[in-house]
Amino acid sequence: MADLNDLYQEVILDHNRRPRNFHALADASHQAEGYNPLCGDRLTLYLRIDNGVIADVAFEGSGCAISKASASMMTDALKGRRVDEARALFERFHRMVTTSPDEPVEDLGKLSALAGVREFPVRVKCASLAWHTLKAAMARETKTTTETEGW
Amino acid sequence: MTFVAPAVFDVARIRADFPILERTVRGKPLVYLDNAATTQKPQPVLDAIAHYYTELNANVHRGVHELSERATEAYEAARSRVRTFFNAADTHEIVFTRNATEGINLVAHSFARPRLQAGDEVLITAFEHHSNIVPWQLACEATGARLRVAPIDDRGELMLDEFERLLGPRTKIASVSHMSNALGTITPAREIVRLAHARGVPVLLDGSQAAYHMPVDVQALGCDFYVATGHKLYGPTGIGVLYGRTGHLDAMPPFLGGGDMISSVTFERSAWNVLPYKFEAGTPHIAGAIALHAALDYLTSAGLDAVSAYERQLLDYGTAALQDVPGLRIIGTAPEKASILSFVMDGVHPHDIGTIVDREGVAIRTGHHCAQPVMERFGVPATARASLAMYNTREELDVLVRALHRVRQVFG
């Protein structure tokens, strides 16, 4: 049986307590609101994209430890990345949290701390909310929910 | 008159009737505290379902053959049992539905809509479940009527003076929960009905939560409609009950059209069947009704007054025990409440609480409990909710409290 510590790793608890880049971004070029209707988690993601590069990224909102930590760690991972790299990272993260717990997954560095949600199927959407919102923001959609993509 | 001593509530005996309570979850004994979502089923209910499909299965109100007659008898005996359970005046005032939600939709559609005109009002309260909000919004949208909401105070009690003030000349119906699913508040239903009737306003009471925690007498309450759902009454899912006064039901057009609800059909026109069949289109949930009968028998033999008193002790014990958990705050502290412990913890989101206590075998509900306006009223995105039933024990609440200490441990 999956251990609680697989889910609530120290790095996740730390990002939950002290979320990074947790503020609005006045000069955002892209922005989207993500919502998980099942639990009410809500976040707004701000991106400043200059010449195809994510120059700055921040978020605001409320949610469980997993969704907040995931958003916080995502913003850390995105800064300075090209948009096409961010899209690729979305796909890699998606694979990591939706692969069966028995199968190996790619090492995504710090983001790998979230691989533990695979053992807790009802919590996968908590981890994916920020990433859905990222995808929506990059596609210039203003709103998204965890129900539109099915993971 | 003979004096009958109150029977001691023997929870161990009750528990022995619920097979699921013997199972383990994640290697721990199941502690089921999500009763406000649905209750577990006692053996007689499970037996009734098996017996129906093994011995009686046939469609009702149709055949002349033995099985159909017996299935019809059993189905109608269930209706009669529901009548006595809620003390309705007449058996034809009991309509079987899928659930309470369907009952409310039926009333909103067939009773309220034809009476509503632009500018009219429907009055509900701030602690309604979505099922007692959305059907009225649909009715209001279709007619141009307006939804008014009576406020609740910081303890989660209905502000009765505000409710009274909102009962205006344009109010065409009031629909109020008999007990809040998110807060546990028991509403002063008789007083609500009295105030509304004094202004000629009919009242629907949503008994989804109340009906399995306390005796309900629809004639004493004086309400026009009462809805309940079988799966919270220790019965199966998919069967619910609508009580409506004869005069109202008679005057209402059907809700759904189909077989069984007609007396004759031609392509030019159809004539409606008598009550209650006018409101039961299609093959009903026969097994569900029959199993609900068994559930109501079970609940009655346990004794609703005894259940109510036992659950109140349990609620008081749980309320005190939760105070031991650092940073925990109970949402919903009305003096008149039953069986609901809704709470938040500093620095921990309810979903994380739910996941961690689940690892200890404890099932609670986390989220907005289909009552988002209640969450907004108390300024929280969600709560964790432990909800009690007659088979729960103090020991189980101790397990919950220990699991909540574990939550504190993880989150520091």
Image (tube, coloured by chain):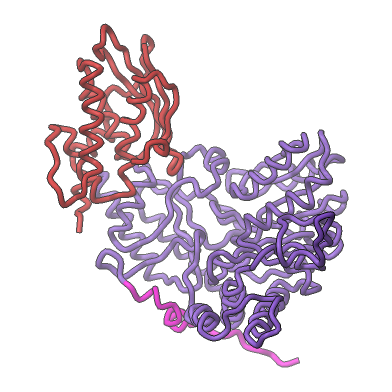
For the C terminus of chain B, which image quadrant? top left
Relative depth, front residue between B171 and B115: B115
Q: Position of residue B397 (x, y in %)?
A: 39, 65
Q: Position of residue A82 (x, y in %)?
A: 21, 15
Looking at the image, which residue sits at the far bottom? B2
Instruction: Give the magenta-colored segment's residue range.
Output: B1-23
Q: Provide the letter of the chain coloured red.
A: A
Query: Percent x, y for residue B63?
Result: 69, 80
Residue under the image location 56 percent in, 62 percent down: B338
Residue A101 position (above or below residue B117): below
A60 vs B163: above or below = above
A150 sits to left or right of B222: left
Residue B231 as seen in the image, left or right of residue B408:
right
The residue at 37%/36% (across/down) is A149
In which quadrant of the rendered view does residue A114 lie?
top left
Q: Is residue B213 visible?
A: no
> Which is nearer the eye, B340 or B327?
B340
Asked which quadrant contains residue A87, the reply is top left
Q: Quadrant of residue B231?
A: bottom right
Percent of width and height locating residue B306: 58, 77
A70 in relation to B247, above or below:
above
Does residue A141 show up magenta in the picture? no
* Rendering colour (chain B): purple
**Is residue B342 visible to us here?**
yes
Q: Nearer the viewer, residue A137 or B37?
A: A137
Total numbered badges shown on the rendered structure: 0
Residue B66 or residue A113, whichever sits in front = B66
Quadrant of the drawing holding the N terminus of chain B: bottom right
| Magenta-drawn stretch contains B4 | yes
Left or right: B81 as drawn, with respect to B313: right
Q: Residue pushed farthest front?
A: B267
